[in-house]
Image (spheres, grey):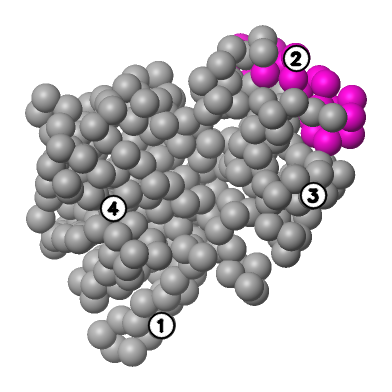
Amino acid sequence: MPADKDINLMVVAAELRVSTPIQLAQFLDTSEQMVRRRTRRLAADGLLNIGSRGIGRRRGRPENLFSVTESGVQFLKEHGRLDACVKPSSVTDSGIGTLIDHQVMLNSVRCALEQTVRLKPELTLRFISSTSPSHVKKTGAPIISDHVESADGESFSFTPDAVFCLTDTTQDKGLLFFMEIDMGTERVAARKSKAISDVRRKVLVYRTYLGRNGYKRYEDPNWFNRKLLGFRVLLVTSSTPRLESLCTLTREMAPSDFVWLTCDALLIDSGLDAPVWHGGGEESPYSIMGANREVESWKSV
């Protein structure tokens, strides 16, 4: 029978879907050595799968990837740590398919956020991932999936990679963020395209969502239970050249102050609250925290 700490590791692995040793260690606030020891034990019991990808953050070394097996899903259900209605494909790596690198990058950004909050006790965080098995509709779709109708009556459905609310308890102020992970596979802008995978169209959809107050649903007690005066879209991309292209696009689409961009390497190395964000695509980087690293307010566009 796995110990409580092993079960907690499985719960985190289920939430992250596909995770690296350092991600689990950061999330659990423990050492990588301890993670490796526990994951080997859980894998031997058939509850975790240990895979790998050829290139990790450490040059020249393959990187282990952990995911919960179908037996692990059943184990978590039997121990009341996972809803009985959750489908195994919503937990195991089979439901991620070819998007493993995308998921790992999302997890890295989330870990950076968790570490920032851990170091700032006045901050609290509520984070909802689109791939979380704990936040799905009865249809199986992520609960953060939404739609917005433009002024000419055109309707768009979209699903952020994540939504989170940061609250400064000393000011009793909550800020809403939408997270978008960009792997460089989507077109920057396509003529006459209505696909949300077109980055330009995605920004337009968020701008419409902001202008039509669609985000206000997150004020509900069942969500973040906070008065919200707008939001920021945090767009994290995978390379510096791609970042430069998206910053140029964002500047050309003004007003676009609500879109903040960075590169995953800068974010992971420097921290989420470091001055690595290009607000509105501007050349000078800023922190999403204000001067003195306090939560900063902003104006809706």
- Report which residue position mark 4 lands on: 176
x and y percentages locating residue 245 in the rendered image:
34, 43
Residue 165 vertical position relative to residue 276 in the rendered view, above or below: below
Closer to the eye: label 3 or 1: 3
Confirm or deny contact between disc 3 and disc 2 (CB under 8 A).
no
Answer few, some or many: residues within 10 Å of disc 1's Cα (few below 14, many 20 plus, some between 14 and 19). Answer: few
User: What is the distance, in whole Å, between disc 2 and disc 1 at their CAs?
Assistant: 50 Å
Q: Earlier in the sequence, mark 2 or mark 4?
A: 2
- Which amino acid is tagged 2? Arg
Q: Which residue corresponds to the image point at 76% horizontal and 51% vertical from the top-left?
A: 77
Give, as a three-letter code, the residue at label 3. Glu
Mark 1 vs 4, N-terminal side: 1
Q: Which residue is mark 2?
A: 37
Looking at this view, is 100 or 15 the one in front? 15
Which quadrant holds the C terminus? bottom left
Question: Where are the magenta residues, as a range?
Answer: 35-62
Q: Which quadrant of the rendered structure holds the N terminus? A: top right
Q: Which residue lies at the image location 24% right of the left edge and 76% below the top edge? A: 212
Left or right: 222 in relation to 172: right
Q: Which residue is mark 3?
A: 78
Q: Which residue lies at the image location 51% right of the left edge and 20% below the top edge?
A: 29
For marks 3 and 2, the one nearer the N-term is 2
Structural distance between the alpha carbons of marks 3 and 1: 41 Å
> Can residue 74 be seen here?
yes
Looking at the rendered image, the disc whose residue lies closer to the viewer, 2 or 1, is: 2
Q: Give amino acid for label 4.
A: Leu
Which corner quadrant of the image does residue 149 belong to? bottom left
Distance CA(mark 3)–CA(mark 2) = 24 Å
- Circles 1, 4 touching at the beta carbon (< 8 Å): no
